Image: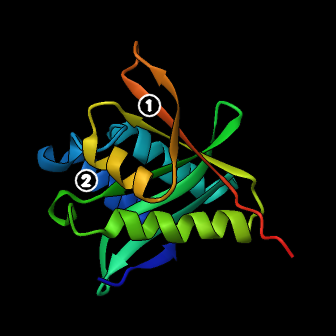
Amino acid sequence: MKIKLKKFNILHSTKFILLSLNPKTSKELSNNFYYYFYRGIKGLFVKEDSYKFAIYVKKKFVGSISFYLNKGEYELGYFILPQYHGKGIATKAIKEMTNYIFNKLNFKKIKAVTNSNNLSSIKTLRKNGFKIIKRNKKAKELIFERKRKWKQN
């Protein structure tokens, strides 16, 4: 399955607002309606320190992936609509995004955080070369990191 990443825009923010109102998808999202509404409006007026992309398969919106500033550190985050789980979309999107982060943005490492119960996300991050660097038992989170591999001349 071929994916395409498109720069995030206000229409994609609107999709997340609608997803946050849907009981089937709202539990999959890390934030609520008000957060997505606020971020969508803010994005119209303020340039943020983030790199956001919508994920498309066959011209259909299936999720998003971003690299954003969180508590002074950049973090990778992604969301795939439930009906597209298990199709390798997140794995491909993370691969494309890590190439972008390392080769275009020139970062040396990438951090990702997931719930310790989210086995599919843990597996997807590991497939993409991420290693667990910290376990936050109180928050039930795993913190992953992937370092850039430098090419030898």
Label of residue 19 in the image: 2
Side (left or right) of 149 relative to 139: right
- Label 2 is placed on what type of residue? Leu
Instruction: Say if residue 66 shows up in the picture.
Output: yes
Q: Is residue 8 visible?
A: no
Query: Residue placed at 38% from the left, 80% from the top?
Result: 3
Local crowd at mark 1 within 10 Å, few (<14), some, or many (≥20)? many
Q: Position of residue 121 (x, y in %)?
A: 33, 47
Label 1, secondary structure: give it: strand
For label 1, the residue is: 142
Amino acid residing under circle 1: Leu
- Say which label, 1 or 2, has the lower sequence index: 2
Q: For the point 40% across and 16% down, which residue is it?
A: 137
Give the side of residue 64 with respect to residue 39, left or right.
left
Decide: is 144 above or below 83.
above
Residue 55 screen position, x and y as percent: 40, 71
On screen, residue 146 above or below 141: below
